[in-house]
Image: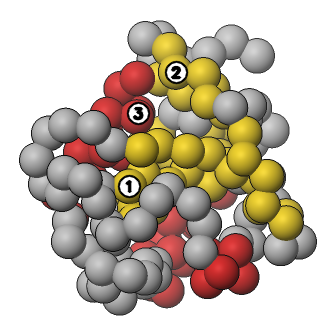
Amino acid sequence: MLRISQALVDQIVQHARADHPDEACGVIAGPVGSDRPERFIPMVNAARSPTFYEFDSGDLLRLYRDMDDRDEEPVVIYHSHTATEAFPSRTDVALASEPGAHYVLVSTRETGQQTGPYELRSYRIVGGEVREEPIEVSDLQTFGS
């Protein structure tokens, strides 16, 4: 189960809407071993594509160095789908390289950049297997262990 604050969900959705019609992508880091998403880190979609996302290799290297310096790890890796449901594509599954992360997808297909309904789902992707998991959204900023 993914436990996440409403504030972080709002930031994911806001980023997805702002980047629409291109896919948005980013990471939410948390203390190593905690499974607590705490620090929102929006990234630039280097592919600048409505059907694909890609982290810039230099940005990704800087991100991992920064997380290492802070004793953090990627708890959530998120991206948006602009024309399809919030379900991992074959490419998403093939590129999933963090077995401990929650892969969160938000679909902006119905509203684009406008406010309104959106679909937000979370998955564990390990060894090519996709397993959807429940999301518990809280008004609290962080969660206890």
Which residue, given by chain and number where applicable, does mark 1 sit on? 107
Can you identify the residue that label 3 sits on? Answer: 8
Quarter location, residue 133: top right
Where disc 1 sits, the SS reads: strand
Quadrant housing the C terminus: top right
- Using the numbered discs, state the Cα–Cα distance from disc 1 to disc 3 in whole angstroms: 16 Å
Q: Amino acid at mark 1?
A: Ser
| Callout 3 crowding tier (Cα within 10 Å): few <14, some 14–19, many ≥20 | many
Q: Residue at x 46, y 59 (%)?
A: 85
Q: Which tag is nearer the camera, tag 1 or tag 2? A: 1
In the picture of the structure, the residue carrying the numbered disc 2 is 137
- Tag 1 and tag 2, C-beta contact below 8 Å: no
Task: Provide the secondary structure element on which disc 3 rests.
Answer: helix
User: Looking at the image, is 11 positioned above or below residue 87?
Assistant: above
Does label 1 or label 3 sit earlier along the sequence?
A: 3
For the residue marked with disc 3, what is the amino acid?
A: Leu
